[in-house]
Image (spheres, grey):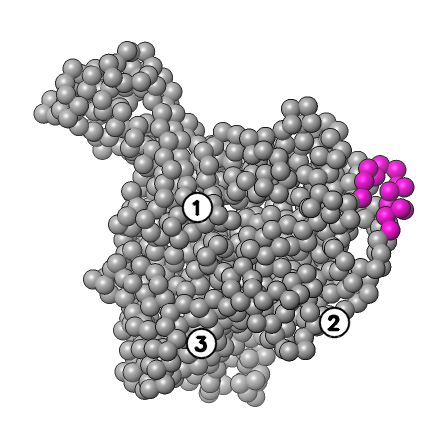
Amino acid sequence: MNEMTPPNTERAAALKGLGSSRKRVEDARFTQGKGNYVDDIKMPGMLFGDFVRSPYAHARITSINADKAKALPGVIAVLTAADLAPLNLHWMPTLAGDVQMVLADGKVLFQGQEVAFVVAENRYIAADAVELVEVDYEELPVVVDPFAAEAPDAPVLREDLAGKTEGAHGPRRHHNHIFTWEQGDRDATEKVLGSADVVAEEMVYYHRTHPCPLETCGCVASMDKVNGKLTVWGTFQAPHAVRTVASLISGIAEHNIRIVSPDIGGGFGNKVGVYPGYICAIVASIVTGVPVKWVEDRMENLMATAFARDYWMKGRISATRDGKITGLSCHVTADHGAFDACADPTKFPAGFFNICTGSYDIPVAHLAVDGVYTNKAPGGVAYRCSFRVTEAAYFIERMIEVLAIKLGMDAAELRRKNFIRKDQFPYHSALGWEYDSGDYHTAWDKALKAVDYDGLRREQVQRIENFKAGKTRKLLGIGLTHFTEIVGAGPVKNCDILGLGMFDSCEIRIHPTGSAIARLGTISQGQGHATTFAQILASEIGIPADDITVEEGDTDTAPYGLGTYGSRSTPVAGAATAMAGRKIRAKAQMIAAYLLEVHDDDVEWDVDRFAVKGAPERFKTMKEIAFAAYNQAIPGLEPGLEAVSYYDPPNMTYPFGAYICVMEIDVDTGEHEIRQFYALDDCGTRINPMIIEGQIHGGATEGYAIAMGQEIAYDDMGNVKTGTLMDFFLPTAWETPHYTTDFTVTPSPHHPIGAKGVGESPNVGSVPAFSNAVHDAFRAFGLTQTHMPHDHWRIWKTAYELGLHG
Ligand code: CDP
């Protein structure tokens, strides 16, 4: 080897590729106020839109009078459904195969529903004009309880569906029923449950909550009437899908639409769907010929834009007397609100809820999900989870605890006894998935050891004795969870959104001087894609990550992709990136061989170069190869060094984790203290350990919020009780617990670099860990099940109902 050449370990480290805790390249601009968010976009002559929203949850609209609003100086227009109807834009399709009013068409179905769109010279005038629009409502009976919605005499909510007995997902059996989705073997499951030694039964409710990203939803629509081109900058988690939908709805040819997602201040599923604000801003820009901005405020975001969860999950789980699980049945009543606007792949009306057998080898199972309409905001988005996986994980992790109580068994031991074994992978679950890989026992044992589980249980026994003896008023809860995620939607054969197959893409251009630009079909909302995707490429093509620009979010330049949500970026676009990198390397090999005057097969890859086999001192670096690609005429090869890959994954990836929460609970005040939170994650090959840790901290904090206080609550009249950040719990640094992170590595066998997603895991895993800790604290006093969120009041009430207040 040439003496001047550093060893390949040093060269590999200099690339900052896979496994490097490379600092986030995005942060320089974010920490210096140089981010470019939708509301930063200011254009000459730009107008502002604002909504008149319904104060009622269910009412008929008898009249709308916008005369006073229109007379206000600075008001340009007031749009109502009557204005949109001639364009056939007063209703729009939802991602779930339903339709949704863009502006109230004759009636309103939830509080905060969009009734009219005021366009004015600035935001303040628009807000004043909203107050001047006079709407007459005739109140109708309100339904907020999904079980009451299915009563025979329940009010008809969706009059537009009158007489429709077929929905997008099969037969509708009632006027407020949306679909029934069944998976698994009902008869076989009933047979097992009917003859089992032990059956535990429970209703597990995962309450309605909201992703509540720091930045609310918004857009700027700009119709260039001269060139016929519509540009929309927006908070879009799936910009290409938005372009296609916008083209189908508006009739504008797709090449004449440019969708740009600039910097996005958190998405968490909230920014996947299409909202009335986008349509109204586009229509207003087309009508006025100038750009129109719409940015919702916090209350609008919480009250009207895409909620999450609201699943009532009735479970039955059976086992032998010594704790071997034999069967599982689950029936879900899913409250979808006024329109079915769930963001799920077309064939999965309850998302991937059928991962609800969790990490356990359950021989037979049956799942039925009934979707129903109520007078609540539409949505049902995947709030930092892969399409209802967090509901599934919460369900099974609660059912395991309930079964442990019924069996009188330690819940950690019950889990260990029923885990899918390492040698069973690839594992076919009773509800239809093929788990690609896993090693649950190793992870579990590592986690239990790390927290000294046996010691904690001994401490808990002592604490209970002390409590009973009146020496303490604090209980100790140990919350266990072992979750299995399913991320990376998805194989095109299984997964599409509105008919668009869920592949993803990466296009790479190597510049003559050896730096590069990679463009992807995904869009980061804080996950650090510009940092980590460059790392994948650095390892694949031997160019330092610092010399690779990653660009996403502009449909005029990025290759078509289905966007970022459900931790699909790494499993799908990350794979596309590796595959495109390999195409670059294959061409680079031919160029290197030509330059070294040897046969293609006589050179081999060495970190950042191709060297002649057996003569490592004869090599060409990627930098030299890149230059040659642009300045040498190489026989049989086109000039340039570019590649594109559209990747259709053969399967999802199945990350997993073992989370343990140790919680102190004060029975007199209902207050809690998180003493310890241990999170072990296995996301296969780790691209950037520092970013992974950040993902875990963020997701676990969201999980903490959900489990311990965050909810979208309604009163009986359909009023949102938690529509501001005074009532909706968003943890600050003060409340956020300390986390200890850990990992095991079980690479995905089908992903080109073995990586699985990770962004959703901490939300999925932490919610049951926090909730199980609350339940576990009260287990010795007879508690089997209570509902989240476990705020101080509810914990206090639980203690009271168990007679612990003396
Ligand atoms: O789709 P989304 O970006 O939300 O989720 P993800 O694919 O789980 O990735 C979240 C962040 O973690 C990205 O920056 C990934 O590159 C990074 N990651 C990683 O470093 N190693 C993994 N095995 C998985 C994700």
The residue at the point 29 percent across, 63 percent down is 428
Tell me whether the residue at label 2 lies in contact with that at label 3, contact meaning CB atoms closer than 8 angstroms.
no
Q: Give the range drawn in magenta.
A: 65-78
Residue type beneath disc 3:
Gly
Q: In this view, does 610 lie above or below 175?
A: above
Residue 719: which quarter of the image? bottom right
**Can residue 58 be seen at all in this image of the molecule?**
yes
Position of residue 121 measured from the top left corner of the image (x, y, whole percent): 79, 35
Tell me whether the residue at label 1 lies in contact with that at label 3, contact meaning CB atoms closer than 8 angstroms.
no
The residue at the point 58 percent across, 83 percent down is 800
Residue beneath disc 2: 141
Kindly state the secondary structure of the residue where label 2 is placed. Answer: loop
Q: Is residue 172 above or below residue 780?
A: above
Kindly state the secondary structure of the residue where label 3 is placed. Answer: strand
Tell me whether the residue at label 2 lies in contact with that at label 1, contact meaning CB atoms closer than 8 angstroms.
no
Position of residue 208 measured from the top left corner of the image (x, y, whole percent): 58, 64
Q: Is residue 696 above or below residue 794?
A: above
Q: Residues within 10 Å of mark 1 (few under 14, many from 20)?
A: many
Looking at marks 1 and 3 on the same chain, the residue that comes earlier in the sequence is marked by 3
Position of residue 445 measured from the top left corner of the image (x, y, whole percent): 27, 65
Residue beneath disc 3: 315
